[in-house]
Image: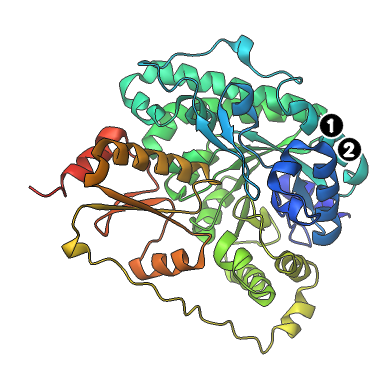
Amino acid sequence: MNRKEIVVKTLRHEPVDQVPWVPFAGVHAGLLKNYTAKEVLQDGDKLFQSLIEVNRLYKPFGQPVVFDLQIEAECLGCGLVWAEDTPPSVVSHPLEDEDEIHVPCKCTIPTKDSGRIPMVLDVMRRMKEAVGENTALYGLVCGPFTLAAHLRGNNIFMDMYDDEDTVAEFLGYCSAVAARMAEYYVEAGMDVIAVVDPLISQISEDHFEQFMHEPFTGLFDHIRELGAFSSFFVCGDATRNIEAMCRTAPDSISIDENVDIFAAKAITDRYNITLGGNIPLTTVMLHGTQQDNMKFVLDLLDKMEAEPSMEVTRNFILAPGCDMPYHVPVENVIGIAQAVLEPEKVREMLSNYVAQEDDTEVILPDYEHLERPLMEVFTLDSATCAACTYMMGAAREAKKAFGDSLDMVEYKFTEKESIARCRKMGVTNLPSLYINGELKFCSLVPSRQELEQAVKEVMPK
């Protein structure tokens, strides 16, 4: 049985002898060939060369072809800002300035010739021919809610209260975009369609049931009819929505380190859904040593195996929590692959290894004696994480409203100092927004009114 067949069996919910490993090497793939993120997301030849190198070095059982949630948004008129080491960010929202939300015509749904889609489809076909026999290939589409936010901006969170019926129609349109993209990708040879929707972690279970159940259920049904497997990919603390996600009937769900993987697997196992995750992107993959990465993998698999009601070789795919940061050391990912493929050999290598403690020191502000309120936004990185982007968007709007009477700072978890700060302050989930050292919004993007009210409450009288 080759590596692809192991992924297929796992997604069919059959037991396997080997835990499959799927590295989500998006822009990080470019690092392997000394190409920038911008180059691999705009140049098909450079993207293809980088993906082949991922396949050679990391020995994946499955791999994504491109990890960019802005492809559809760009086709639909969103403005992007490009960076050398991250995917692009949406900086303008074509429907943001309208007083009321409206549903675009389905005639605007991107075609195979729109934007960068032709380049992506060409690379998918080339990857299918080159490695498709032994590697399960993932086509990633932007989820309906994240696409809705790309088009409407932070207003979408208030629209959910003000105009429920139109929001439901709007999400239906965004779901139709995702369904069309899935058709293109399956035709190009993709085995798994991952619907990537980071913003699902930023809404309540009630809002999920009200607005998301129908579009996602229909989307996963459609992917099944196309003959492909599906994955519901969410970032951030989606704990409250894991069961609701299961009820939309995807073949698999992928989570990041904000979610307790053991608690999540207990739920996904009840629904016979495969769970993927959740190697920490920054503390382990980006800033850890090769031995740290190997040890994390072995410890995770051992703990899962030790759970009486849990089978590590059924309904589980080992993967990073989300798109790997560009600068993850290559040796760390190779170490993960080795731990998966040769666990006993790696155990012997780690027999005397003791992880080093991080001694980074931070000094917290004197919150009791601030000259003006301080708003601190803790993110993975607002340039790369969609949920973080919209939390920062809400913070920037508040800063604009209050001007010099409010201070604001972002702490990115990709930076070691910010990791230490999170530990010292007890920040457990990203994104989170603190005002004067107190947690105000955790994994829930506030509306403009909610955030402005929270700031007013701490303003000097």
Q: Which mark is residue 183?
A: none
Q: How many numbered marks does the figure carry?
A: 2
Circle 1: element type = helix
> Marks 1 and 2: CB-CB under 8 Å?
yes
Q: Dot 1, crowdedness within 10 Å: few (<14), some or many (≥20)?
A: some
How far across and how far down the image is residue 459, in percent?
15, 47
Which numbered dot is residue 122? 1
- The crowding category of the residue bearing disc 2, from other C-alpha atoms within 10 Å (few below 14, some 14 to 19, many at least 20), is some
Q: Residue at x 21, y 46 (%)?
A: 405
In the displayed structure, does residue 454 sit left or right of residue 328? left
From the top left corner, tell me how far across and down residue 443 is, in percent.
40, 48
Q: Viewer-proximal residue, 140 or 49?
A: 49
**Secondary structure found at label 2:** helix
How far from the left and from the top, in percent, is residue 29? Answer: 75, 52
Q: Position of residue 134 (x, y in %)?
A: 88, 49
Say which residue appears at 47% left-offset and 80% top-offset: 359
Three-letter code, disc 1: Asp
Residue 225 shows in this picture: no
Quarter-of-image position of residue 297: bottom right
Q: Residue 2 versus residue 286: which sits nearer the camera?
A: 286
Q: Residue at x 40, y 64 (%)?
A: 422
Q: Indicate whether 214 appears above or below 323.
A: above
Quadrant into which the N terminus falls: bottom right
Q: Quadrant of residue 12?
A: top right
Residue marked by disc 2: 126
